[in-house]
Image: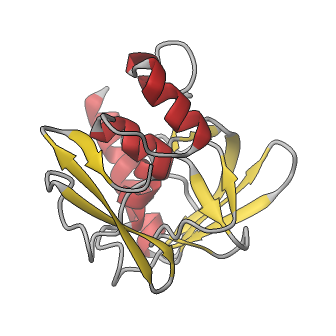
Amino acid sequence: MKSLRFIALVLGLLLAACGGSQAINSDGDTSGDYYTAVNIWHYKPMRIYSTNYHTGTILRVGTRCRVTSVNEKGVEFETADGKQFRILHIPRHTKISVQEMFGRYFAKKNEMGPGGKFENFTPKERDAVRGAVIHPGMRKEAVLMAYGYPPEHRTPSLDEDTWVYFKGQYVPFTIQFENGRTVKGLY
């Protein structure tokens, strides 16, 4: 079974590298619906930058969607109500592959549902994820779900105690951690 998943993943990666339109998750599965794994901000639904600018409207974590294209330029998907979105892969800011980016934004399982990561959060962390805000004392996993991933050009490792996000193209802000929990930032 593992070898079949590996073959599916390799084929999906090859299709993506050739400009194919395959949705790829960590299991190599390319079919079916997905859920957003983090809150996603967008000013223009068809121009969401992988830099993760925190401006505009929020597409909530746990939103069911169908991925329609994954290629070197990014990921296109639509929600159940027919709205179309495109996350543009910006390699100089998001120093990971499109497939890795896809795995950060989407999950086969609804992490907000039964058995999902959301259940492991404290009540205060759950409120923060629902509200797309940061509260003092949040664990990094909850910050990721509430705010998404910080761009790698300013936060090369999630092991760091300072994460840099952006309100807009030139407006950075930081979230500080101590012992894996938030201590300073936008609250």
What residue is shown at x 41% (from left), y 40% (from top)?
135
- Residue 62 spot, x, y in % from top left: 61, 35
Query: Quarter-wise, where is residue 153 in the image?
Result: bottom left
Residue that appears at 35% across and 56% down: 185
Q: Looking at this view, is 140 or 187 the one in front?
A: 187
The answer to whether residue 164 of the structure is visible from this angle is: yes
Residue lying farthest top? Answer: 114
Residue at image location 21% in from the left, 48% down from the top: 177
Residue 107, x across and y down, in percent: 50, 38
Q: Position of residue 156 (x, y in %)?
A: 19, 67
Residue beneath the point at 37% across and 80% down? 91
Seen in the picture, residue 64 relative to 71 is either above or below; the reply is above
In the rendered view, would you say 39 is above or below 164? above
Asked which colour scheme the image uses, the reply is secondary structure
Residue in front for this viewpoint, 100 or 162? 162
Residue 125 placement, left or right of 153 = right
